[in-house]
């Protein structure tokens, strides 16, 4: 199998797993291990995450445009919502600054990924038993956004889903399914963008992922973007129809299979 085909496979996997609650980082670690694909210079994750960042910007383009206009016009609701998004980033940023070595070592362990996938699967599967009758009268505020940000800290471990953990905690706090999904995805924009900036700053922009032309990197980013848009749509529909817990069964199965 050519390196380019491997990258495309990972691009599809990234687009699917970045937004569906199955942990893109965990799947990429496992897939790269099994495909025998190593990266250097600009990392493979850098390119693929750039594609999924584009997916969020495209899917929520109207919401983001309205939010930006509101910020520049001094709209209090827009300023408050943007502030909540920024506040949600603080716990993850602090955790990475203090424990970056631990997080990076975790990415080298398929055993750690497997255990984290099972953990993700367990809390997602619990949606089947309590989410249907959960109250939904709370809204995103300063306290709730910070608590959701704490959930994002745990998701820095490969195998723990960022969207799954943040939506799970949002629902525990009584936030509606639609608002929980929207906030989880919008708060991923500065997170992914920040990760890209940090990665470029640390690793530089020279070097290559694998021995393929640069234009093929762009194809991979485009694939992850298109697949990411479809995945966001599926995520929102699964929450709306009460089938979110299916992803928990999947994560448990994949985690156990990988351990075996």
Image (cartoon, rainbow, N blue to C red):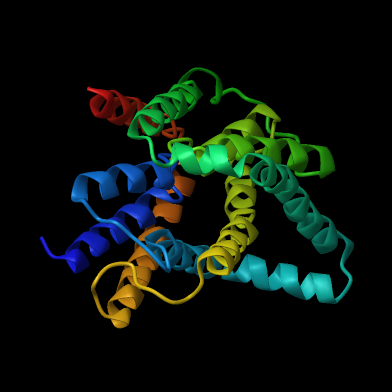
Percent across and percent down for residue 142 are 83, 43
> In this picture, is 254 found above or below 63?
above
Percent across and percent down for residue 48 are 40, 63
In this rendering, does residue 240 appear at all? no
> In this picture, is 86 found above or below 201?
above
Residue at horizontal 21 percent and vertical 44 percent from the top: 34
Residue at horizontal 38 percent and vertical 35 percent from the top: 109
Residue at horizontal 56 percent and vertical 35 percent from the top: 165
Q: Residue furthest left?
A: 1
Q: Which part of the image, by quadrant, shows the N terminus?
A: bottom left
Name the quadrant containing residue 138.
Answer: top right
Percent across and percent down for residue 110 are 34, 34
Seen from the viewer's position, the closer of residues 3 and 233 is 3
> In this picture, is 231 found above or below 20?
below
Count of numbered marks: 0
Seen from the viewer's position, the closer of residues 147 and 198 is 198
Name the quadrant containing residue 196.
Answer: bottom right
Seen from the viewer's position, the closer of residues 136 and 55 is 55
Seen from the viewer's position, the closer of residues 75 and 104 is 104
In-image side of 24 versus 11 (left or right): right
In-image side of 6 versus 214 (left or right): left
Q: Which part of the image, by quadrant, shows the C terminus?
A: top left
Residue at horizontal 24 percent and vertical 58 percent from the top: 9
In-image side of 232 versus 2 (left or right): right
Percent across and percent down for residue 181 are 57, 46
Name the quadrant containing residue 214.
Answer: bottom left
In this rendering, does residue 249 appear at all? yes
Q: Residue furthest top?
A: 129
């Amino acid at each position: 199998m050519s390196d380019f085909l491997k990258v495309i496979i990972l691009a599809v996997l990234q687009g699917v797993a970045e937004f569906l609650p199955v942990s893109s980082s965990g799947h990429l670690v496992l897939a790269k291990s099994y495909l025998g694909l190593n990266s250097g210079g600009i990392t493979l994750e850098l390119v693929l995450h750039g594609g999924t960042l584009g997916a969020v910007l495209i899917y929520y383009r109207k919401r983001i445009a309205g939010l930006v206009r509101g910020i520049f016009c001094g709209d209090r609701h827009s300023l408050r919502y943007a502030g909540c998004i920024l506040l949600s980033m603080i716990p993850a940023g602090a955790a990475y600054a203090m424990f970056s070595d631990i997080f990076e070592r975790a990415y080298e362990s398929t055993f750690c990924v497997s255990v984290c996938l099972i953990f993700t699967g367990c809390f997602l599967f619990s949606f089947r038993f309590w989410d249907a009758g959960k109250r939904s009268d709370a809204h995103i505020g300063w306290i709730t956004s910070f608590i959701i940000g704490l959930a994002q800290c745990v998701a820095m471990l490969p195998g723990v889903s960022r969207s799954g953990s943040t939506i799970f905690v949002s629902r525990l706090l009584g936030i509606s399914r639609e608002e929980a999904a929207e906030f989880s995805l919008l708060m991923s924009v500065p997170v992914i963008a920040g990760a890209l900036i940090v990665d470029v700053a640390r690793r530089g922009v020279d070097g290559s992922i694998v021995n393929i032309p640069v234009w093929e990197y762009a194809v991979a980013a485009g694939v992850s973007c298109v697949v990411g848009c479809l995945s966001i749509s599926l995520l929102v529909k699964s929450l709306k129809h009460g089938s979110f817990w299916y992803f928990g069964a999947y994560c448990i199965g994949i985690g156990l299979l990988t351990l075996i």
